[in-house]
Amino acid sequence: MALDKDIKQQLAQYLELMEGDVVLKVSADSEKASLNMLELTDELAAMSSRIKVEKAELDRTPSFSVNRPGEETGIVFAGTPLGHEFTSLVLALLQVSGRAPKVDAKVIDQVKNIKDELHFETYISLTCQNCPEVVQALNTMSVLNPNITHTMIDGAVFKDEVERKNIMAVPTAFLNGEPFTNGRKTLEEILAELGSGADASEFEDKEPFDVLVVGGGPAGASAAIYAARKGIRTGVVAERFGGQILDTAAIENFISVKHTEGPKLAAGLEEHVKDYNVDIMNLQRAKRLEKKDLIEIELENGAVLKSKSVILATGARWRNIGVQGEAEFRNKGVAYCPHCDGPLFEGKDVAVVGGGNSGVEAAIDLAGITNHVTVLEFGAELKADSVLQERLNSLPNVTILTNAQTTEITGTDKVNGISYIDRSTGEEHHIALAGVFVQIGLVPNTDWLGDTIERNRAGEIIVDKRGATNVPGVFAAGDCSDSAFKQIIISMGTGATASLSAFDYLVRHQSETVNA
C-alpha cells in the first residue's frame, strides 16, 4: 500500500529524528493484506538507512515486529498500521530507535517498576480515533519494560479471530490471553487498572486553591487557562483530561479550524493548559461539594481539595436508552461510537436508536459499511438537519422508523435483535440484527452534586449570565450547565466567562488572597 506524497514527506521528517537502528521482522505470505504490509515496510526501509527489514515467522501473518538490532522489544503490528494508527507506527519507530517517549518521569518509573510479565493484545480498527491512545500507551510500556509486550491487531484483517473472541467493540485489549479493558485509555489509566497507578495520598494536604476547576474538557481547559493567566493558584481535577471530545471524530465547526479530530483537539487543550502553572490532577472523580469557610471537593479516593472558588465543568456523557439488554450487551453489540465500532459490523444488519443529527450521521456512516441500517426515532419525525435527512433518504439500505419506542435489546452472549412498540398503533415488533448504536443525546455529569447545587429537571446546573450558581463562589460552564446549546466553542466561551467571574468574586470577597 504505497504512501501518498504528502504522507511520505511528513514521514521523512519524522524518520530523521531516529537516534539508532531499527529492525522490522516481517511475517508475510502472498495474500493481499500481506502484500500491502510488505509495500509499507519496504518503503520505510527505502526512506531511512536506519531501518532494516528481515523475514521472520511471527504468531500472526501478516505482521511485523519493531526491534533494536539483537534485541526484541515486544512491539508487533498485526496488519498495516495506516489510517489512525499511522502515528502509532511513527512513535514506535522513534521510541525503539532510542528517542525518549514524551511521558512524565513519575509515570516512566511506574512502568519500569512492573515486575510481572505482561503480554497485551489490542484489537483495533483503522477508522477508530480512540484506538491509537491504547496502542501507543502499550507500545510505550513495551519499550520501557522488557517484561511487557504488545501486539496491535487489525480486526478487519483478522476477522476470524475477532468472531471467535466475540469482539464487537474497539479498542479491546487482552492481557495474558484474558480480556483486560475496552475503550479509550491513557497510559495512566492502564497503570491504574493494573494497580500501578499514582498513590491517591499525593492529592491530600494540598494548599487551598484560588480557583479549582472540576473537569478537563473544553470548558474546564478554557477556565483553567483564564484563571492561570491572572496569576492565581489554579488547579484542575478531571476524570479524564479532554472529556467528551476524546470520543468525537471529525470536528468541522470550530471557528478558524476547518477540520480537526477530537483526540487531536484534546491533546492541544492539555498542552496549552500545561504551558501555565496549573496543578493538573487527572484520573480523579469528584464525589462531594460542600461550602464551608472554603469550598471543599471530596474525591472518590477520599482526598479532600479546598479552594476559595470552584468552577464546575464536568460535561456530559452518552444518554442510555434504559431498556433491558442495553447494559448487558455493551461492547457485545451495543455501541455508542459508529466510527470506532462500525467496521466490526461489516456486512451485518444494525440499528441506530435516535433520529437527531448524531443518529442520522451515524446511520449514514454505517450504511457504507453494513448490510442494512434501521433508524428508530421515538418522535413522529426525525430531528436531524434537513440536509442530513436528504442524504439518509437517498441511501438504499436504510429503513427509517418513526414513533418507535425501543423496549428491549435481545441476545444471548451478544446482541441478536431489538424490540420496539409502534407508538401510533401500539403494535410490538422485533428486528433481527447484530448491533445497536445508541445516539439519543447527552446527560450532564452532575449526579454527585446532590441538592447542594441547584439544577433543572434535566440535571443541568442552573447559572446566571456570569456562570454563577446558587452557591457563592461556585460557578459552572459547558455541557453540565443549562447553556442553550452544547457546542465545543460555546463550552470554551462559558469556561472563560466562569473563570473571569470567579476572579471577580475573589477580588470582591477575598482581595487579600489574590496576587494580581
Image (tube, helix red, strand yellow):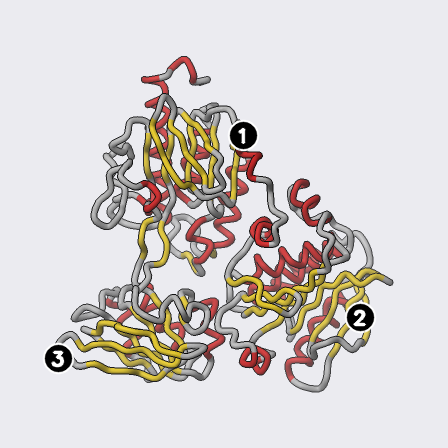
Q: Nearer the viewer, residue 250 or 283?
A: 283
**Disc 3 from disc 1: Cα separation:** 61 Å
What amino acid is found at the position of numbered circle 2 in the picture? Val
Which one is nearer the viewer's eye here, 16 or 342?
342
Find residue 385 and report its horizontal and vertical position in percent. 25, 64
Find disc 3 in the rendering and name its residue.
Answer: 425
- The answer to which of marks 3 and 1 sits earlier in the sequence is 1
Q: What element does badge 1 sit on?
A: loop
Q: Is residue 82 above or below residue 205?
A: below
Q: Name which residue type carries label 1.
A: Asn
In this view, the residue farthest toward the bottom is: 30
Asked if residue 45 lies left or right of residue 293, the reply is right
The amino acid type, in three-letter code, at marker 3 is Thr
Quadrant into which the C terminus falls: top left
Picture coordinates of residue 496, whole percent (x, y): 37, 35
Regarding residue 24, the answer to whether it shows in the image is yes
Residue to which mark 2 is pinned? 53
